[in-house]
Amino acid sequence: MPEKAPDAQIAIAHLVSRVEATVVSSLLRANGVPNVIIGDAHASVEVNSWVLGGHRIMISARDHDETSEILRHAWLEGMDEPSYAQGKAVLRVFLILTALKLPFLAIVAIFGPLSFGWFIALLVQGLPIPVNPQGRGDYYLAAPSVS
């Protein structure tokens, strides 16, 4: 496979989450590595973020080794473990929305005809809450340098 030209742009990461892409990009910029996020214009609050190509962080080929080392040192122990905080937050929002609807449902059920279908429809309206899809991105790091 031919070597890349030093000024060629290569992908260092292909990520699902726009937030993760922005954080990684900021980390690299803070360490003096210029980069560009491809796909930054679309948000990752919809599952189609990955269908649209995700978010790719592009760097210069000459910065590949340095960038790989920066990313290796930035990852903390436990980064591979899934976080359930977002799922819990979405569940809380869904439960709050449902709790706010219950008094209305009770009034309609007591004073007017309410079919079971409408009752279920009102309860599940909160299900399409946009959520950032969780998934591990792909990082294309250079081989570690032997010292």
Image (tube, rainbow, N blue to C red):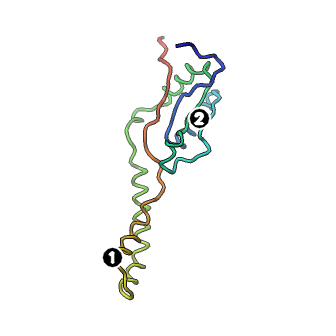
Q: Which residue is drawn at 50% across and 23% down?
A: 141
Q: Which residue in the rendered view is the most extreme toward the top?
A: 147
| Residue bearing mark 2 | 25
Q: Position of residue 3 (x, y in %)?
A: 57, 13
Q: Which residue is drawn at 50% across and 47% down?
A: 48
Mark toward the viewer: 1 or 2: 1
Q: How crowded is mark 2: few (under 14 residues within 10 Å), some or many (20 or more)?
A: many
- Amino acid type of the residue that numbered disc 2 sits on in the rendered structure: Ser
Q: In which quarter of the image is residue 35?
A: top right
Residue at 44% from the left image edge and 72% from the top image edge:
100
Number of the label disc, if any, that sits on residue 1: none
Q: Tell me the SS state at disc 1.
A: helix
Give the residue type that dot 1 points to: Phe
Lower position in the chain sequence, tag 1 or tag 2: 2
Question: What distance separates the C-alpha of mark 1 from that of mark 2?
Answer: 50 Å
Residue, far bottom: 111
Question: Foreground: 142 or 88?
Answer: 142
Above/below status of 19 relative to 131? above
- Decide: is 104 above or below 62: below
Which residue shows up at 62% across the image and 32% down it?
30
Query: In the drawing, does residue 7 fall left or right of residue 87?
Result: right
Q: Mark 1 points at which residue?
A: 116
- Mark 1: few/some/many CA within 10 Å (<14, 14-19, 20+): few
Task: Please provide percent x and percent y for residue 33.
Answer: 63, 27
Q: Mark 1 near mark 2, Cβ–Cβ under 8 Å?
A: no
Q: What element carries label 2?
A: helix
Q: Where is residue 89 in the image (x, y as percent from the top left)?
A: 43, 55
| Quarter-of-image position of residue 97 | bottom left
Residue 7: x %, y % from top left:
66, 20
Q: As rendered, which of 115 and 89 lies closer to the eye? A: 115
